Amino acid sequence: MNQKEIESVIALASEERYKYFIKKVADSEIFYTFTDDNGNYVLSTIDEERLFPLWSAQEYAQLCKVNGWENCEIKKLDLDDLEDEIIDFITDHSCLINVFPVFDKTGFVVDLMEFSKDLSDELKNYG
């Protein structure tokens, strides 16, 4: 991924980054989140809501290692991880999904049902 692509994608509005994320993840079946030193998933909180961050590429996650997330580890996940672990984690912790935050700005916040539907619909194009 080149710097020009990174700059153009992070300049998009959050909804457009969400669409980009869905297409990229449907194509690659890979995405990224953060864990702490103990390997636990890292959440942020906005307006009493817990948010689970996701990015379509390691480079975008790296840009968000600021304001308290400097020591986070970037964890690579695939669709099996989503099905076997992430969905349960999000459900158990009553999280919303923060898709593609940039630096310290919140991304597109979506609930698990909408996220799953959008990703499933896009995956049908790659079947």
Image (tube, helix red, strand yellow):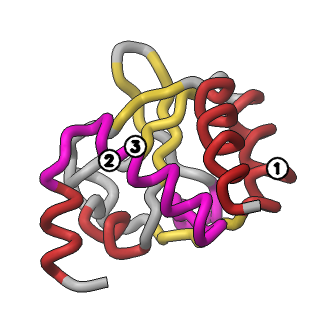
Q: What residue do we see at 33% from left, 57% from top?
A: 69
Tag on residue 37?
none
Q: CA distance from mark 3 to mark 2?
A: 4 Å
* Position of residue 122 in the picture relative to residue 71 (left or right): right
Q: Residue 5 at what x, y percent from top left?
A: 21, 73
The residue located at (57%, 24%) in the rendering is 111
Local crowd at mark 3 within 10 Å, few (<14), some, or many (≥20)?
many
Q: List the residue tagged with mark 1.
A: 83
Report the Cα–Cα distance between label 3 and label 1. Answer: 19 Å
Distance (Cα) linking label 2 and label 1: 22 Å
Which one is in front in this view, the residue at disc 2 or the one at disc 1?
2
Residue that appears at 42% across and 74% down:
58
Judging by the rendered image, the residue that carries numbered circle 2 is 17
Magenta stretch in the rendered image: 11-40
| Residue receiving disc 3 | 18
For the point 41% across and 44% down, which residue is it? 19
Q: Secondary structure at mark 2?
A: helix
For residue 11, above or below residue 15 = below
